[in-house]
């Protein structure tokens, strides 16, 4: 059965104003708490995505990018088949991937970041904290997506050992839903 990540139950409400949510709704991200919250359209419109805001609207962008995933994983020094590349508010680029004790986070060196930006110009347009480049060896290329998608994928990875196949299926379903 195909799953729609934007579907809701009768009990889901906006985290900011408690209004009932529609089938399609927005998400906010709190970088300090590293939490995603559901938001109604009204709250989403009035809250910025800019750096000083506590809650930032997560863009709905979900786009494929052309890259050699296996080469990208090797250049980033990632020992597993999936990595998330994000920008922090301070301009640092980080690589995050699942490890035995949880999420491993490492800073990407300026030289590697420059090479990645040259190879994949779209990563230079990532919104800090709320968007990421998701690279998985089972995908053809990578995906630019919101942090809500990333956290959903990482949650699935913790729950299922057959991660690459699960990720590929989830992302295909997300593409169809949007």
Image (spheres, rainbow, N blue to C red):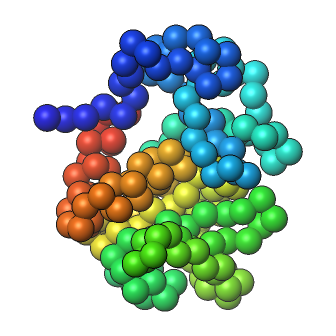
Q: Residue at x 39, y 12 (%)?
A: 10
Q: Report whether 52 appears left or right of 87.
A: right
Quarter holding residue 158: bottom left
- Residue 118: x percent and y percent? 60, 76
- Residue 85: x percent and y percent? 55, 67
Is residue 26 positioned above or below 101 on the image? above
Q: Quadrant of the C terminus?
A: top left
Quarter holding residue 126: bottom right
Q: Is residue 10 in view?
A: yes
Comparing 72 with 99, the one in front is 99
Quarter holding residue 57: top right
- Residue 48: x percent and y percent? 77, 33
Comparing 1 with 131, the one in front is 1
Q: Is residue 69 in view?
A: no
Q: Report whether 146 appears left or right of 7.
A: right
Q: Residue at x 24, y 67 (%)?
A: 161
- Residue 36: x percent and y percent? 57, 41
């Amino acid at each position: 059965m195909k799953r729609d990540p934007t579907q809701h139950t009768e009990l889901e409400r906006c985290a900011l104003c408690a209004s009932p949510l529609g089938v399609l709704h927005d998400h906010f991200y709190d970088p300090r708490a590293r939490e995603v919250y559901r938001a109604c359209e009204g709250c989403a419109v009035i809250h910025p995505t800019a750096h000083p805001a506590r809650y930032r609207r997560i863009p709905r962008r979900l786009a494929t990018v052309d890259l050699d995933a296996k080469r990208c994983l090797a250049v980033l020094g990632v020992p597993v088949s999936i990595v998330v590349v994000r920008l922090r508010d301070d301009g640092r680029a980080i690589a995050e991937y699942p490890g035995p004790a949880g999420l491993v986070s490492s800073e990407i060196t300026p030289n590697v970041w420059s090479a990645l930006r040259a190879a994949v110009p779209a990563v230079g347009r990532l919104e800090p904290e709320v968007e990421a480049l998701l690279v998985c060896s089972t995908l053809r290329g990578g995906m630019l997506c919101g942090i809500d998608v990333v956290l959903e994928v990482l949650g699935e990875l913790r729950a299922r050992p057959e991660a690459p196949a699960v990720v590929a299926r989830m992302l295909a379903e997300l593409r169809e839903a949007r």
